[in-house]
Image: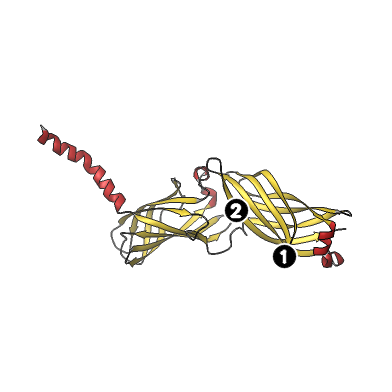
Amino acid sequence: MRRALFPLLLAALLPFFARAEERLSCGSVDALEVTSLTRTKLTAFLRTTLPNAADGGRQEFTGEIAVANTPLPFGPSLTAMAQQGPAGNAVVLLVDLDLAKIPQALLERLHPLALDVTLNGSLSGAGGAPVRVCAAGILRIGTPQVRSAAPMGGSLAGFSGARFTGISLTQVEGQATATLFNPLSFPLDVKNLVYAVWAGDRKLAEGERHGLRLHAGRENAIELPISAPSAELLSALGDAVAGDGRVAGRLVAQVSLRVGKDQILTIPLDLPGSVQVLP
């Protein structure tokens, strides 16, 4: 009886052994480098180390890349560049994402401090047989594991300028205007926006806005109240007030978006603009 049960037990366990072997042969996702961010598309290099790869330096990846267990919406295949090394195959995938196609489930599962990235599919070279590949990694935001090759935010955010108009003996009131473009197909909720208006190395005013919503697929103008003591403003902008009333300035802000389950993703902004003082 025991001899009869052993082959049946072995047959039942073989799939589990095969999956365990497949997991052990997986590689690692090492870094994400954003090379371009426009109002419609994000382009990035996804750097991996894989135990296996197809033949040739230029290859094609077919399969799934997921962040926080949410598949990313890219085309039927991706270009990959492979280079053999002593620690395995360094494979870099060129990823193009249509921002309007990113699913809302990704935002709901996103962690503000790290990206859980998995890769599962196959690599094929010129004329060679496809090679099965998989990889996984936790990429920490704010470290070299997630980086940008160029300043981000310029295409999605803008500073239309600050104007001080309500001048009194003690206080000057005014308003700054920021524009935030939401490229996604669903709205984004901002818990708070902390901002400061600068001219050169002088902070002129600061403030906060709370409970904002960025509507989907459009530019959102946000009015930011500002005020400053009259003496300090005249000291910082004396030449401007004596001239045409306008100087170069910038808006430095932190936008805190609601993501995941009761979590916050903070995005820093440093946007050029102008500061104007009107009588």
In space, the residues marked 1 and 2 are separated at their CA atoms by 22 Å
In percent of width and height, residue 146 lies at 49, 58
Taking the image as shown, residue 5 lies to the left or right of residue 28, namely left
In the image, farthest residue toward the top: 1
In percent of width and height, residue 220 lies at 67, 49
In the image, farthest residue toward the right: 169
Q: Is residue 183 visible?
A: no
In percent of width and height, residue 15 lies at 24, 43
Residue 267: which numbered mark, if any? 2
Q: Quadrant of residue 154?
A: bottom right
In percent of width and height, residue 229 lies at 82, 55
Tell me the residue that label 1 is attached to. 201
Q: Disc 1 on helix, strand or loop?
A: loop
Residue at 67% over, 51% down: 194
Taking the image as shown, residue 156 lies to the left or right of residue 161, namely left
Q: Look at the numbered discs 1 and 2 and tell me whether their residues touch, using CB distance below 8 Å.
A: no
* Up-down relation of residue 258 to residue 195 (above or below): above
In this view of the protein, which residue sits in the foreground, 259 or 61? 259
Q: Quadrant of residue 160?
A: bottom right
Tag in front: 1 or 2:
1
* Up-down relation of residue 174 to residue 14 (above or below): below
* Amino acid type, callout 1: Asp
In this view of the protein, which residue sits in the foreground, 158 or 123? 158
Residue at 77% over, 60% down: 275
Quarter of the picture holding the C terminus = bottom right
In this view of the protein, which residue sits in the foreground, 144 or 48? 144
Q: Disc 2 on helix, strand or loop?
A: strand
